[in-house]
Amino acid sequence: MALNAINGQFYRFGEFHIDAKNRLLLRRSEIIPLTPKAFDLLLIFVENPGCLLEKEELMQQVWGDLFVEEANLARNVSSLRKALGENPKSPEYIVTVTGHGYRFVADVEELSSGGTRQTPKEQPPLTLVGESPSLREIKGPQAPHVNVDYVTRERAGLPTVAIIGACCFFVILTIVVALIFLRSNKADPATAPVELKTIAVLPSKPLAAEDRDPASEFGLAASLINRLSRIRSLIVRPAAAIVKYTSIEQDPIDAGREQKVNYVLASSYQKIGEKVVLTAQLISVNDRAVLWSDKCEEQCNTFAWQDDLAEKTTRSLLKTLSDAHRLAVTKHGTENQKAYDLFNLGLYGWYANTYDTERLIRSAGYLEQAIALDPNYATAYALLATINSRLGISAGAGRKEYERKADEQAHKALDLDETVVEAHLVLGVSAYTYHWDWSKADEHFKRARELNPDDVGVARTYAAYLASMRQLDESLYWQKRACDLQPLSFDLNAVLVMRLFLARRYDEAIEQAHKALQMVPATPTMYYAWRCYEEQHRYEEAYRALQELIAAEKQPDTAALVTRAYATSGYERARFVYLNRRLKSLEAKAQEDMFNPLEAAIMCALLGNKDDAFKWLEKAYDCHAQELIYLKVTPEFDNIRSDPRFSGLTGRIGLM
């Protein structure tokens, strides 16, 4: 048994459709998210309908030679059942055969990319009355197996009339099957393969440089992104991905190619006295064709124009626009123009300066003013909660107050509009990184996934949660999904290195680190590359990676000591010198707000100082260090994991 994910391969069962090439499961036009292993499992099931698939065979097919517990198979089957909406007590698709494995019981149709049904792998032979079972049979597409050795039959004394009758029967049966075949392959909008449409909405451009208003330019694009992202069959690049395209000279086609999208929505504006003239175009990236253009002048209403653009774009890409689609893309956060302008100032400050504390505080001020003007501005509450949550991470002892404010503002956003994804993400992250309430976190992430599984924030934050819960394959699936949604993000690609490291997939982590380092030569990525080489006992490469890490940290004294230690005593001594120097540097900053005790605990664990490692772990526990969520999967703690103090600490955090 082998996965048959050939190019252009499609399967259909019930109301579901599988695109094996693009690894997509769809219910009509809705994409159903699956982890990589669950998708592999589903492919095996649909390629072997009705067959009893033993557990050992399934585990070998899905995980290969990697040792995994049987519980992994059961968990992925459970995940697959949930995705299919199946009740295990009355299964429609996957039946458990106690003591053996599973059987996929749904009728499966195999289709080519053009919708043509392909020859099934097996068909039960149709034995005609009086037919010798030893006679040669010929298989035909969707036709029964019939004996066509007429010469043998005639020589055996079969009457000519019987031969004619058999031929007629065969012809009639073939016509009937052909009619069924043609009817089943007519275009069916509910089950036909869905072509995903990808689009980037670029910041608006002024026709004159002196008219520049960066916050409004970005705000218009972000508002349209938010609206279009509510349509499940559209993949819209997030606001964080397009904030870089602010140059007046930026070619929208180049931006679209860089973002790897099919379409670009580009707009511009011109100030003529008190009047602002707005124009927009939807452009096909492949052939530069303009699908439509629009112009708004004579006291243009910003909200009405955004409604019009979102509706036109959706209708152009989907061909049909349902009432639900129209309602989704024309939903406003506020009707107050001044509040909207202040929101845009806060939004632009958030995306342009995510790690600049002063700018974030200023952005929070704009949002508070927007809320004062419109107390029902749910998305403003959600963004304010997001900013306070980020500020809390670097606030040291002040984190508690930021977390309190973030929780309060996120709850207020949901009281006003339960569908605000960002508010669910804030509460989900706060629940498991600060309150260590894992079930509450799961509730919010589940709701966020239901609302928009193609939101990059959903994918990124849910990946972190899954990693903390030791569901590492699923975590990697969602992190890679985040990278696909925002392919040029260094942050997302760098975090993928860490996720691969936690999963002990060291070769992949090293490969991903090289990719991320080509984007930005950042020290955390260098650290994981070094540690991957260490875990693989590739010490020459580990030493070179360590040298690059030290150079990036700009520690010439440490570099000289490490080089001398390596020359005289080898890698182990050079490693000890680096770790010891790094630990002392961290201890010197122990009283600073930004100090993270978990970093010191990691250095102690790598040095083999078990008692000191637990001392710093306790300090990390006292200050709710965010990275404690990975305690059960961090390779650096493998050598102290068997200590009772370790299980006691993870138990207090709720990591069972």
Image: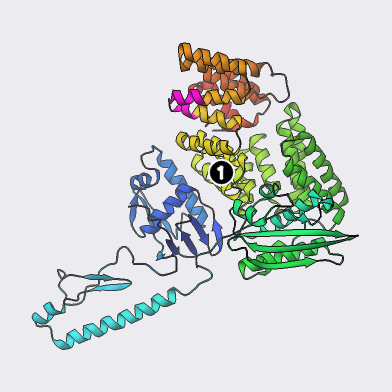
Q: Amino acid at mark 1?
A: Gln
What span is in magenta? 532-544
Q: Quadrant of residue 521?
A: top right
Residue at image position (83%, 66%) is 297
Is any atom of residue 538 visible in this view?
yes
- Secondary structure at badge 1 equals helix
Residue 193: x percent and y percent? 50, 65
**Near-viewer residue (614 or 565):** 565
Given the current orientation, which residue lies at the most extreme bottom position?
161
Residue at image position (61%, 67%) is 318
Q: Find disc 1 in the rendering and name its residue.
A: 479
Q: Image height check: is 395 above or below 386?
A: above
Q: Quadrant of the C terminus?
A: top right
**Going by the image, does 615 lie left or right of 533?**
right
Residue 377: x percent and y percent? 80, 52
Q: Image height check: is 148 above or below 368?
A: below
Residue 535 included in the magenta stretch of the image: yes
Q: Image height check: is 19 above or below 459?
A: below
Is any atom of residue 229 visible in this view?
no
Residue 487: x percent and y percent? 59, 47
**Near-viewer residue (579 or 252):** 252
Q: Image height check: is 563 above or below 419?
A: above
Residue 519 included in the magenta stretch of the image: no
